[in-house]
Image (cartoon, rainbow, N blue to C red):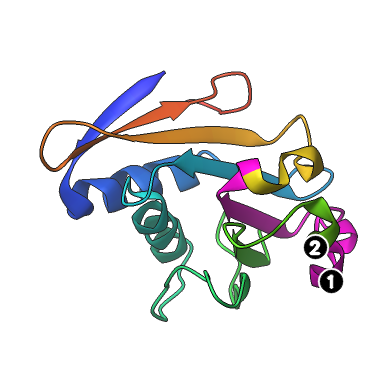
Amino acid sequence: MTRAVKGSHDMMAEAARFAATLHPRPEATIVALSGDLGAGKTTFVKGVAKALGIGEHVTSPTFVIMKIYDLDSPPAGGFKRLIHIDAYRLKGIQHLKVLGWEDLIKDPGNLILIEWPEKIDGAIPANAVRLTFRHGTEDTREIDYNSRHVGAV
């Protein structure tokens, strides 16, 4: 399924709608966000974070690689943490060990959003939700949802 959004406000609203479809799994819920630079991945993460009640400013963790946001009052979805990973600078899955990847993906309270997942594709579980962002016309972006793993989007 593909959705077109126009501007950052619509991207944030689409992300909030998407966040409402997510529910904890037996292990961490992983969302892989692929797409070119400037295609809307970080704005989408900001929208998910806002929908989950995160009030602090969310930026792409390009230089710190990973940012963990604790959810003080878990929303109806039941997640305890939003973990935002920007894998752009990673040279492969071996660099995930330093981040504690194996423990992160085992915790059902974790919602993990990964930008540039192709850099660590061998570490992304098969049941991950995969979204692809593309530039459309002018300020329009298209989001392709992997319908096998996404609820009623």
Whole-percent x, y for residue 1 in the image: 42, 18
Secondary structure of the residue carrying numbered label 2: helix
Say what secondary structure mark 1 lies in.
Answer: helix
Left or right for 125, reference 73: right
**Residue at the location (47% across, 27% down)?**
145
From the top left corner, tell me how far across and down residue 7 is, in percent: 16, 48
Report if residue 112 lies within the magenta region.
yes
Asked if the residue under mark 2 is in contact with the one under mark 1, i.e. CB atoms within 8 Å, the reply is yes
Residue, x 52% and y 43% (percent of image)?
33
Q: Position of residue 44 (x, y in %)?
A: 38, 52
Quadrant of res 58: bottom left
Quote the CA–CA distance across marks 1 and 2: 6 Å
Q: As shown in the figure, which amino acid type bears the numbered disc 2?
A: His
10 Å crowding of disc 2: few (<14), some (14-19), many (20+): some
Quarter of the image with the C terminus is top left
Q: Residue at x 46, y 68 (%)?
A: 60
The residue drawn where x is 55% and y is 27% is 151
Q: Which label sits on residue 98?
A: 1
Dot 2 corresponds to which residue? 95
* Rendered location of residue 92, percent (x, y): 76, 52
Q: Nearer the viewer, residue 137 or 119?
A: 119
For the residue pair 44 and 40, the one nearer the viewer reads as 40
Q: Which residues are magenta?
A: 97-118
Judge whether 66 appears above or below 146 on screen. Answer: below
